[in-house]
Amino acid sequence: MGALVKAGEQLPAERQATAEQQQYLTFVLGGEMFAIGILCVKEIIEYGDLTVVPMMPECIRGVINLRGAVVPVVDLACRFGRRSTDLTRRTCIVIVEVEGEGERQDIGVIVDAVSEVLEIQGSQIEPAPAFGARIRTDFIHGMGKLDGKFVIILNVNKVLSLDDLALLGQMAGQESMDALTAAA
């Protein structure tokens, strides 16, 4: 079991199948089950004190101090166009590492509840559905099949794209400026 495979050697078929399995953290958001690759999850923390930052888009709830680092916190339900997450005792923040344009940044994601870590074989993951050109599905890595139900596997680098979040911030700032101009 602990034997190493040298470069160029093939894994036995049964070990190749195991190598195709990936682990995903599953969580509930608005009654739906979602998953993200465990390799991008840094930690899960209890929902706590957020510092609200003015002129941010609605989906960016604020920032937290995580061992001296300022980490933005995104309400994932709001990011998906749903209403803001209702806070309960099971609400938590999943800290994920997002990569964009060669940069890595930690971002907190508010979820209703964390479920479990599951292994899903590659053969049990269907591609994202095609809804047409006007509906974005690039944030969906795939649809995992578990016990006859689907789990939406998210591509965190797309869902939490630093460029998209910056654009949302610019739009929120412009809306605030338009409101001030209209009030004057």
Image (cartoon, grey):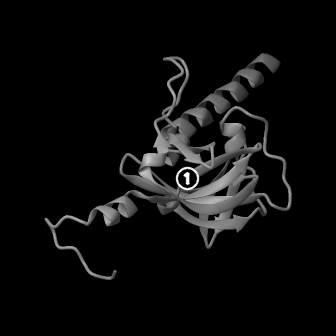
Q: Position of residue 148 (x, y in %)?
A: 63, 44
The amino acid beneath tag 1 is Ile
The quadrant holding residue 25 is bottom right
The quadrant holding residue 60 is top right
Q: In percent of the image, x 73 and y 43: which residue is there?
A: 54
Judging by the rendered image, the residue that carries numbered circle 1 is 36
Q: Position of residue 12 (x, y in %)?
A: 26, 66
Q: In percent of the image, x 63 and y 55: which residue is there?
A: 26
172 above or below 95? Answer: above
Q: Nearer the viewer, residue 98 or 88?
A: 88
Horizontal side of 22 relative to 42 (left or right) equals left
Q: Quadrant of the C terminus?
A: top right
Q: Quadrant of the N terminus?
A: bottom left
Q: In the structure shown, which secondary structural element does the residue marked by tag 1 occupy? A: strand
Q: In percent of the image, x 78 and y 62: which residue is there?
A: 49
Are there few (<14), some (14-19), or many (20+) residues within 10 Å of tag 1?
A: many
